[in-house]
Image: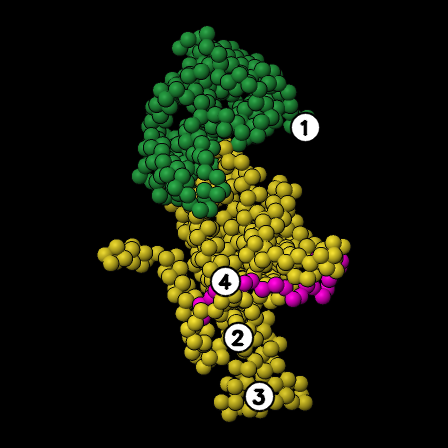
Amino acid sequence: MSTDQKPILSLQGVIKRFGGLTAVDQVSFDVPKGEVFALIGPNGAGKTTLFNCITGMHVPTAGRVVFEGRDIAGTKPYRTAQLGIARTFQNIRLFEYMSALDNVKVGEHVRMKAKLWDAIFRTPFARREEREVSERAMEHLRFVGIERHADNYARNLAYGQQRRLEIARALATEPHLLLLDEPAAGFTPQEKVELMRLVDKIISRGITVFLIEHDMRVVMEVSQRIVVLDHGEKIAEGPPAEVRKDQRVIDAYLGKSA
Amino acid sequence: MKRLRVFVRENSRNPNAIAYTVMAIGALALPGIVQFANGGNGDFLVSLAADGGVYVLLAIGLNVVVGFAGLLDLGYAAFFAIGSYTYGMLASAQLISSPIHHAVHIPFWIALLIGMFVAAGAGALLGAPTLRLRGDYLAIVTLGFGEIVPRFFRNMKDWTSGVNGISALDVPTLPFWITGPWASTQLAIEHNFRFVSFNPTAWYVLVVILIVISVIGVNNLYSSRLGRAWMAVREDETAAAAMGVNTVNTKLLAFAIGASFSGFAGAFYGAKLSLVSPDSFSFIVSITILSMVVLGGMGNIPGAMIGALLLYSVLYYFLPGAPAQATALAHNLGMDWLNQSSPDGWPGIAEFIHRLQFIIFGLILVGIMLLRPQGLLPSRLRAQELKRGVHDESAVVTT
């Protein structure tokens, strides 16, 4: 990994306030391209808020969010998806009453070109595109290993499969940067191992992965670089081995010793 | 032949395919059957069926908004009104008395499309300010819109003749038309054909064709990129946006496309009745259409159509006919005293049933919703949703 490459995502002094509460306070860091980048921190540290600022669900109160060289702070969520940022959600948000395949096909929506006209009259172009999209969607399901459940309603999948489906749906948008919000939450150790393998596969496709995770073992193993948030502030940044030894991180997680 | 057999086998357990087939056969056979059954005097019933077709069109359109995109619209009759008035003003002598002093006579076929686009535009216009609202809040705003539009037409006296409405609308014309025994006449080709009110079969055929076109269009939409986006927005708007679905445009399109069907239906309705009056588009019309969609099976196109047909025939055929039926029944049972009104307040069975009409209607609605809460012909989705309890348990086990 060449370090002289420009970062894919760069946060510069991002602040997010809700009324009097400052959820994210002056956070700056760079996410290098092609790596697994992790964001950790105790509950309520502002991790998900930061994700929301990146994907456009929140407009940062101040600061810049630079994605591939352009400031995207305040861009609408669907635009950030079009630009190449996909995400999953901490509490799974699938389209419950749509089949797994259709869920993934919604992810393909951004890359599809059929117009209203094509849709109403089912033009040859629309048909061909539908076919291609179905095939690609199946491939994504295969990639995460749930192709057997393509026709099941998303809500009827087991928990672990739902998490995978969410990743497949996000991958279908053909992102350059994939944000995973606690992808291993509620997983058994075995499932966590499988997830780490999946993350490796995603990286090998050239997609940068930026994840929030609580499980230290997963974080230490999978990520090249870690940022630690506490009370909305960045308290540490660096490779896993360094961060683990950082006194402020230990204090944040275990409480300060008197 | 073999292909047909395979097709039949594959679809013989698909309720939607069966419903479409039954409706198609019924639609083809209906004029002939009612004419035969009434000894050539079935025109009234064919005309009634053609009016029912208007409601089928409306139900198909509302199903797009409510069933597909999950936007509760309580003012759908407004778009119906807009379609009707558009046709009324563009295809009659009405505008002579308006500030522009010129009658506009646009041919029906073009006015139909104009009505469609005007209604779609109105749908987008209503959609624009309401897009931040969801669920109940949206319902209230659409309710308001549904109340405003007919009043607007009533008060635009210079343009719409106010309460009197617009009458003597142009009828559609065609270069030729085939008529035959199904309309209780000789098989013949008529040239320079005009759709007149004493030829209901022509209107009936026209509405069936409109329905067929609409069903094909909506079915295509349903399985398209846009249809998926609608359902994604219905299921989870935030997630849909995060997947790159422009939720604002998607919802606007749902409103506009849903409204375009009622514009369609409105133009047809105005032309057939040759009268457009502000009283035809009251709140109860919106509610009736919504009931049709819910009763038939929200989100399922043939479901909504069946709901429309059923409710329409109850409201406009069985209930109006019920007093006469009851009188005849009492007579046949030798209980003619039931038919006389008596001084102690008994109004006679006909009047009694007549007064009970809406109670009967309400009971039918309540009964169906109790017996089949998912609707008569539900989409796969609603059927599942109502089994939620069962599935939640199994989900817990698998976690």
Residue shown at 61%/85% (left/top)? B348
Where is mark 2, residue-wise? B44
Q: Residues within 10 Å of mark 2 (few under 14, many from 20)?
A: some
Compute the Cα span from label 2 to label 1: 67 Å
What is the three-letter code of the residue carrying label 2? Phe
Residue A5 drawn at (x, y percent): 46, 10
Compute the Cα span from label 4 to label 1: 70 Å
Q: Earlier in the sequence, mark 3 or mark 2?
A: 2
> In this image, A21 relative to B238: left or right?
right
Check residue B175 in the rendering and tell me which mark sits there, or answer none: 4
In this view, the mark in front (2 or 1): 2
Q: Earlier in the sequence, mark 4 or mark 3?
A: 4
Whether residue A213 is situated above or below residue B221 in the rendered picture: above
* Chain part drawn in magenta: B153-179
Give a yes or no on whether discs 4 and 3 share a subunit: yes
What is the three-letter code of the residue carrying label 1? Gly
